[in-house]
Amino acid sequence: MRHIIIGTGVAALAAVESIRSVERGAEVILLGDDPYGFYSRPGLAYFLSGELTDKALFPKTREDYRRLGFTYRKARVTKILRDDTSVQLEDGSLLTYDRLLLATGAFATPLAVPGSTLQGVVKLDHLNDARNILKLAKRGRTAVVVGGGITALELAEGLLARGMSVHYLLRGNRYWSNVLDEQESRIIEARLQEEGITLHFHSELQEIIGRSGRVNSVRLKNGKTLKCDLLAYAIGIQPRADLAREAGLNVERGILVDEFMQTNDPNICAAGDVAQVYDRISGRSVLDSLWNAAREQGYAAGLNMAGRGTPYVKSMPFNVTRLAGLTTTIIGAVGHGRDDDLVGIARGDSETWRELPNAIVAQSGFDVNRVRILVGEKKLIGAVVMGDQTLSVPLQTIIAKQIDILAMRDKLLAQNAKISDVIVDFWSNLNPVN
Amino acid sequence: MSFLHIFKKSAKKRATLAQGQVVPDSSRCVQCGICTYNCPIEIDVRAYAWRGEAIHRSECLTCGECVARCPRGVLRFERTDLFRAAAK
Ligand SMILES: Cc1cc2nc3c(=O)[nH]c(=O)nc-3n(C[C@H](O)[C@H](O)[C@H](O)COP(=O)(O)OP(=O)(O)OC[C@H]3O[C@@H](n4cnc5c(N)ncnc54)[C@H](O)[C@@H]3O)c2cc1C
Ligand code: SF4
Ligand code: SF4
């Protein structure tokens, strides 16, 4: 049995692990075109800000790989030949498979304004992008950042940490308005401004202007011009589904897979950012471009390839991230799902938690520690925990397990409720300590 | 003892000093490596987080460096497996 996996991201690695957990003997070949193989993509932000060296981004040692026993080939796959059950590499050679996994991830949506090809226009997708940004940051003094999600914010903070003066353009009137509520946006904005980032609301890029092939300034739709040496963008991502599309697999925005991560070709699975997964609960096929989802999907795909298919049950979406230095956990359905500020999906964004929840909001906060909970009839639907994370695990559990909250519902919704106390009380009754 | 005490700082600190161990919630971990990078005695905290295992290493100083630095709130000190049992 030969398994071929295209990709070296977390979905691919998880698939190798699950295949190996049930099959010692099968041959596993990983094909990837990233020159550095497997590393932490979310970690790139910390490499950019200088909190990590590039070496520290690599979670696995040689020994780990040896134990997993697979063959790695640095190569780009150019074609899938389903009739011959083989893949074609860029040098033209062919490799046959018994089972194939597409774990090709996603790439940053390119900018579509004039001047996007100038030197100094950058995105953050790969380690090489991060290295390139650092090189340019050394030369430049002023950066403009475009995009409404997490990656854009990370770019802004990373460039600031590297000593650049940073202008951050927001299309709407506040930061990440389709997920955060107004107060939450304001907290982040205030912190960014304190750090020294200049925010420009209602500002959209019209054109990037160059001089001798390099970024020199940007013109905005409102007529303003800003001088800059670097333009960084993060306006959404796109699944790398071309291989699948050309091979005639069913593709919508991502590669359509069933609960076993299987495409419409029984020998081919897909997992991670490239896959559009069937969600039993909503009955829809959704993208879930998150690290942990990619890992779980890869694991399920590997089991299926090894003939031990167990359905992948999409877990309740949650994302933990650092926004302007504040750890923020977003759980379940949060936000209104409209896109005034984003094109496509932001990095680390899940579609599900941007659906409109049918719930009453309860919130409490002091200083920057803030909790917002979406309270349904019988259960909690979603939550945002900003700053102190004490409540995030209990909330995650209560929401994921759809625990009946009748015992605390009124207390939560009472005027000036001390939400933290109510949750802790409720939680300690669920999990009594002797 | 009421569970509420765990949320009180002083009690938390005492508990940590008594028998704290660092416990990860692997579903939150993005393998960035900040924990491992900052551990003063070079414990590969990230590898534990990947496997979802508590760091039961006698050398662990329970200094809290990894817990404090993780940008995802993955790590916490724990006396019992209470949270973990409930979170699974
Ligand atoms: C800067 C940044 C910040 C992020 N922050 C967060 C966050 O805070 N939280 C979160 O949950 N997620 C975050 N993410 C998203 C998270 O990293 C992804 O969801 C996850 O890495 C997806 O893993 P994957 O295995 O599906 O794909 P990837 O990691 O993208 O791997 C795909 C691999 O396939 C290879 N490949 C593609 N096509 C071919 C081909 N034709 N031939 C050979 N190889 C090919 C690519 O080179 C790549 O190595 C972030 C991502 C980035 C870039
Ligand atoms: S710092 Fe946190 S998110 Fe990063 S690898 Fe360690 S446990 Fe995981
Ligand atoms: S508590 Fe301190 S010594 Fe122990 S693993 Fe964390 S950083 Fe290392």
Image (spheres, coloured by chain):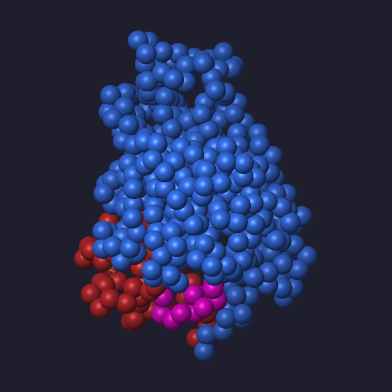
Chain colours: A blue, B red
Q: Quadrant of ligand 3?
A: bottom left
**In the depicted view, which residue is nearer to us: A198 or A279?**
A279
Is A70 on the left or on the right of A224, as rendered? left
Total numbered circles: 0
Residue reaching furthest to the top: A212
Answer left or right for A430 relative to A227: right
Is residue A30 one of those drawn in magenta?
no
Residue at 26% across, 59% down: A62
Query: Picture coordinates of residue A400 (x, y %)?
Result: 63, 66
Q: Position of residue A267 (x, y in %)?
A: 56, 56
Q: Position of residue A5 (x, y in %)?
A: 45, 52
Q: Is residue A147 above or below residue B19?
A: above
Q: Write the residue at 30% across / 66% down.
A: A67
Q: In which quarter of the view is residue B73 placed?
A: bottom left
Residue beneath the point at 33% across and 63% down: A69
Q: Which is more toward the observer, B72 or A361? A: B72
Which of the pair A361/A411 is nearer the observer?
A: A361
> In which quarter of the view is residue A427 placed?
bottom right
Q: Quadrant of the N terminus of chain A?
A: bottom left
Q: Position of residue A335 (x, y in %)?
A: 66, 48
Q: Is B67 located above or below residue A159 in the figure?
A: below
Residue at the outermost bottom position: A434
| Segment tinted magenta in the rendering | B78-88
- Of A229 and A426, nearer the camera is A229
Residue A401 visible, this angle? yes
User: Is B82 within the magenta?
Assistant: yes
Q: Is residue A190 visible?
A: no
Q: Residue at x 31, y 23 (%)?
A: A140
